[in-house]
Amino acid sequence: MIIDFHTHVYPDAMAERIMAALSNVPGVQGHTDGTLIGLQRSMAQAGVDKSVILPVNTRKGQFDTVNKFAKQINETYDNVISFGGIHPDDDHIAEKLGYLKENGFKGIKIHPDYTETFIDDERYIRIITAAQRLGLIVVTHAGKDPAYAVIHCPPDKGRRMLDAVHAATGFVKPFFVFAHLGGNRLLRDAEKYLVGQNCYIDISCSFSGLGDFSDASDADIVRVIKHHGADKILFATDSPWNDQKAYIERFLSLDGLSDSEKELILGKNAEQLLGLK
């Protein structure tokens, strides 16, 4: 099974406008139309069995709208799983996370740049700690975002957040996912602060030459996988901003990984984390 752990879709009425706005950012190119149907067509062409959709709450007060759309997706389709979204300035955080848990959501997505809030801010630590206690997975954008000058989730702050949540909860099983190889365009810091820690790392936007996001070489990616452990790496593309088919082909072409390691990364790790087995 192939599971893409990092994708995005937008409501049909908004997708064209959102895709046009985001595609104006230098180096950003859409490979689908941003709709759910567009993602499913991409999945069929690429041979992806399931995709995890990660909504982003960019403003306080979007909780109901964003998660209503996500809930409808989960109730309607079997080949996609939408996480929930939450903003660090939202009120009644515990109740909102409880709602997501009660309604079958597997996890939440946060984006420190879009909310202009550092990952080790007490508001995010409160959200992440509460999510861990509820058994919710948390995925964050990590490293440089091409639309922002300030990096709100650099690896050192990510490590401080992890340490704070561990101190508060004593978690043993990893539940937190750092996207983009732990820190887009901050590979050395990611290796220093996050690689080998009790967390997952996804490989979305990691292959140089597939878009203009990453400066990591294929050898860099293999080194991170080996040092972090293939059992804590998740295959992910950040569709629509990367082409799923090209991404799978590039991943499969990596030298230095065994077939069993590639199987773990392509789907087995995600199956276990999502409780699909």
Image (tube, grey):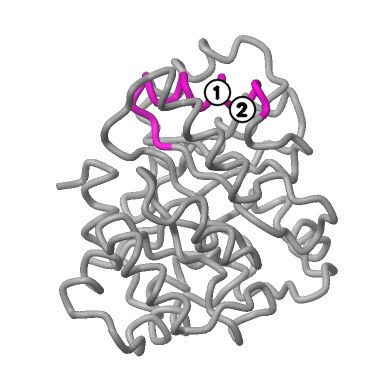
Tell me where residue 268 appears, x and y as whole percent. Answer: 21, 59
Instruction: Give the left or right position of residue 71, taking residue 274 as reference.
Output: right
Front residue of 207/27: it is: 207
Give x and y (percent) for residue 73.
46, 43
Which mark is drawn over residue 23?
A: none
- Locate the N terminus and report the quarter of the image it occupies: bottom left
Q: Identify whether 102 is placed above or below 43.
A: above
Q: Residue at x 16, y 73 (%)?
A: 260
Q: Position of residue 59 (x, y in %)?
A: 77, 32
Q: Are marks 2 and 1 in contact (CB under 8 Å)?
A: yes
Q: Give the magenta range.
A: 121-137
Q: For the point 58% across and 15% down, which residue is it?
A: 93
Can you see residue 105? Answer: yes
Q: Is residue 224 above or below residue 275?
A: below
Residue type indicated by callout 1:
Ile
Quarter of the figure with residue 249? bottom left
Question: At 80% across and 58% down in the image, what residue appears?
Answer: 17
Asked whether residue 7 appears in the rendered view, the answer is no
Q: Which residue is disc 1 drawn over?
A: 127
State the CA–CA distance, disc 2 to disc 1: 5 Å
| 33 with respect to 72 (left or right) | right
Q: Which residue lies under the disc numbered 2? A: 124
Magenta run includes residue 123: yes
SS majority, magenta: helix
Closer-to-camera residue (103/153): 153
Which amino acid, by three-letter code, is at mark 2? Tyr
Q: Is residue 113 left or right of residue 51?
A: right
